[in-house]
Amino acid sequence: AQKVTQAQTEISVVEKEDVTLDCVYETRDTTYYLFWYKQPPSGELVFLIRRNSFDEQNEISGRYSWNFQKSTSSFNFTITASQVVDSAVYFCALWMDSSYKLIFGSGTRLLVRP
Amino acid sequence: EAEVAQSPRYKITEKSQAVAFWCDPISGHATLYWYRQILGQGPELLVQFQDESVVDDSQLPKDRFSAERLKGVDSTLKIQPAELGDSAMYLCASSPYYTNTGELFFGEGSRLTVL
């Protein structure tokens, strides 16, 4: 079975706090890709990052960082020094080469308060 | 910057009426997807096209939903008759080719409310 679980429905933090969004996935494929997308109030899904299943190196992009651990099937996303503009719904997604499908988690709504 | 265009942005309709959504993908993108996103949930794939051919419509409720991409460019998603449970955001996405390892480009979506 293929599945993406985002257990945190909603997170609220005060500006400048660090916040981590959790993502756990299930797949039997050996080749797959993991994604994070951001969905602001406008509704458009904005691509943030893609990682393939063979690359467990963590990645940092400005205030964003991602921690990929195959041993725990997790791909967590951390925002450092959060800002009000980070308020959005964030989706973790799984792409499998066996089906060419992108499966999304249920999303985590992040609210950053001034 | 090239975008995926969708219309209408908002649609309110009554139960049992017909409704249609239109999507124009990024120029040159061969693969087109329609997703449905119910409030509070993640997007769910309804149908996937490669050029004008349907690749996957296993999650499309075919008794009331239909989708077409006649010339392999823009696409229309139709619901007839609409039901209350169809209220959702309908998202269109495109990618340059079928096996593009999941990097999809999304439009802003069409929000449907069925009364």
Image: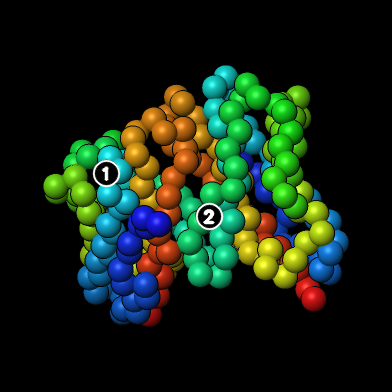
Identify the secondary structure beneath mark 2.
strand
Instruction: Identify which amino acid the numbered label 2 is placed on.
Output: Val
Instruction: State the separation of the CA atoms marked 1 and 2.
Output: 20 Å
Query: Where is residue A72 shown, x and y percent of the image?
Result: 76, 30
Is residue B61 rendered to the left or right of residue A33? left
- In this view of the protein, which residue sits in the foreground, A30 or A19? A19
Within-10-Å neighbours for mark 1: few <14, some 14–19, many 20+: few
Is residue A11 rendered to the left or right of residue B105? right
Residue drawn at 37 percent across, 75 percent down = B10
Is residue A82 rendered to the left or right of residue A51? right
Q: Mark 2 points at which residue?
A: A46
Query: Where is residue B24 shown, x and y percent of the image?
Result: 27, 57
Residue drawn at 83 percent across, 56 percent down = A18
Within-10-Å neighbours for mark 2: few <14, some 14–19, many 20+: some
Query: Where is residue B93 shown, x and y percent of the image?
Result: 38, 51
Residue A51 in view: yes
Q: Please tell me if label 1 and label 2 are on a single chain.
A: no
- In this view of the protein, which residue sits in the foreground, A100 or A15? A15
Instruction: Identify which amino acid the numbered label 1 is placed on.
Output: Gly
Colouring convention used in this rendered image of the protein: rainbow
Image height of B102 relative to B23, above or below: above
Residue projecting furthest to the left:
B71
* Quadrant of res A50: top right
Image quadrant for the C terminus of chain A? Answer: bottom right
Identify the secondary structure beneath mark 1.
loop
Query: Where is residue B6 shown, x and y percent of the image?
Result: 32, 64
Residues tagged 1 and 2 counted as in contact (Cβ below 8 A): no
Chain on which label 2 sits: A
Chain on which label 1 sits: B
Disc number for residue B28: 1
